[in-house]
Image (spheres, rainbow, N blue to C red):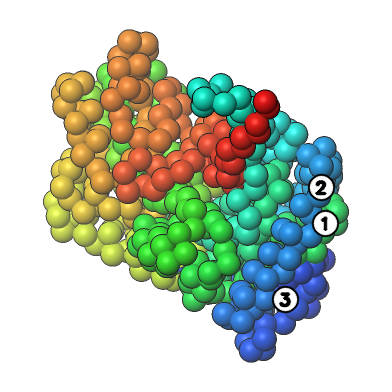
Amino acid sequence: MTDYSSIAGFRPAWLGDGRKKLLIDGQAVEARSGETFKSFSASTGELVAELALAGEADVDRAVKASRAAFEGPWSRFKPAERQALLLRLAELVDAEFDDLAMLDTLEMGRPITASKGLRGMLQRSLRHFAGVASAIHGQTLGNSFPVELLSYTLREPVGVVGAIIPWNGPLFSAAWKIGPVLATGCTVVLKPAEDAGLSALRFAELCHEAGVPPGVVNVVTGAGATGAALSAHPDVDKIAFTGSGPTGQRIVEASARTFKKVSMELGGKSPNIIFADADLDAAIPAAAMGVFNNSGQVCAAGTRLFVERPVYDEVVARLASFAQGLKIGLSLDPSTQIGPLVSQRQYERVAGYLALGPQQGARLVTGGARVTEGGLDKGYWVEPTVYADVADDMRIACEEIFGPVASIMPFDSFDEVIARANSSRFGLAGGVWTKDINKAMAAVKRIRAGSVWVNHYFAMDPAVPFGGYKMSGFGREGGSEHIDAYLQTKGVWIRTE
Ligand code: NAP
Ligand code: MG
């Protein structure tokens, strides 16, 4: 029997002695201060790596390298060269994919089977960005100026990008930040989350192995202060941020001093609506995994589950029994479906809401407790939890928990459920389950959110935009708007008479 209780036999060879440096100007370098920080396994509590802690001086060094690269040979790369580079990167990433997935699992605890499940999406994404590289184009525009002038637009890279990503899907987040950078000819300084920075670091190294010149892709591992230094740096042209609302607000404030272009992928409290005529055999498992996937640490989780009254009791019972059937276990065990939360801090946050639910009158149907038996005492596992009879104004129904907690609420009419679904300050995503196409389309039109899934939950693709309405942010990742955010438009006039 394989021993999944220690990371010892699972560490990718790349980790070596576990000491990792910053990646600046194509070189692995220590932080100027010599400071480091440690990253631990969310599943076993063991030390995974000790990383350099980038301070302001290091961020400045990385931004300078990024600027020099932006103005250097990289600016003369042809679209086809950037495309070839992205295709090579896709191959290198695929060849090393199991190790990259393992790095995420080792640090943030996502079950290994789920981490490995992202392979196709990552490949599609990198190959999509490769396609984009040779498809960027401006327009020729008619004008009515009194003298003859040809007018057209040029699409140019925005410049030095500061990318700041969270820990809940590090490899994927890094790819969705760096991919558009390489496609458009920008350069980047990437700041991963301190709880899970290794896969981003290795991904950036692979960019170099694929032929990216030094300085184009830099990684500054560190803490919140590292991200703050990046978002305040005067020579950063754009900040691409994924994370929480409060951090996003700090970044917007800091970026305002030099009017950086900013995109914000923030959190949510997404409604998932099951109408009585829905195919419940499909809706129930999808709605459950729409909450419990990655132990609920997913921005688009469908945590407000609205169920039409005639099927309410049935859905509550079947969803609870589905939740009870999920296999909670060590992250390295391929049969595990529910892994630990990322950290003690995240557990305390979730535990706070688990105490609040019943206090505010929600009915606990299943779950609600930490799990420590079976070798699960070194991390923070929370049972998939279902609350029924949740009122819209309870805090568990309003605030993003970022844990495996579903709130189920009954509804009686279409207009009522749409109004309640929209009563959130967030607007990241929503789900609709019905066999009635007209009802589905009416709901799609009225839900105020950046993504709506009908008879599905969680589909994502690099060709399709994803992002927030309201306090879930602004800007889109995926689709053409993703690329637009890395480009500037120049209007050009040429006298032709
Ligand atoms: P977070 O605390 O906002 O952290 C996100 C990133 O910002 C981390 O790299 C963090 O560094 C860094 N950071 C912290 N303070 C900063 C500051 N003052 N200035 C600049 N950067 C700073 O978010 P989290 O708790 O790690 O992640 C969970 C949140 O992300 C949830 O709200 C979730 O919904 C959201 N999310 C959204 C999406 C989306 O696409 N919409 C996707 C995934 C997650 P440290 O970690 O080192 O502190
Ligand atoms: Mg960790």
Quarter occupied by residue 162:
bottom right
Residue holding disc 3: 21
Amino acid, disc 2: Phe
**How far across and how far down the image is residue 279, in percent?**
39, 18
- Give me the disc on residue 422: none
Identify the residue at image location x=39%, y=54%.
402
In this view, 228 is above or below 441: below
Determine whether the residue tagged by mark 2 lies in a helix, strand or loop: loop
State the separation of the CA atoms marked 2 and 3: 28 Å
Residue holding disc 2: 77
Q: Marks 2 and 3: CB-CB under 8 Å?
A: no
Left or right of residue 165: residue 287 = left
Identify the residue at image location x=36%, y=61%.
249
Q: Residues within 10 Å of mark 1 (few under 14, many from 20)?
A: few
In this view, 177 is above or below 460: below
Quarter occupied by residue 202:
bottom right
Location of the N terminus (image quadrant): bottom right
Determine whether the residue tagged by mark 1 lies in a helix, strand or loop: helix
Q: Nearer the viewer, residue 254 or 33?
A: 254
Q: Nearer the viewer, residue 391 or 492?
A: 492
Location of the C terminus (image quadrant): top right
Q: Residues within 10 Å of mark 3 (few under 14, many from 20)?
A: many
For marks 2 and 3, the one nearer the N-term is 3
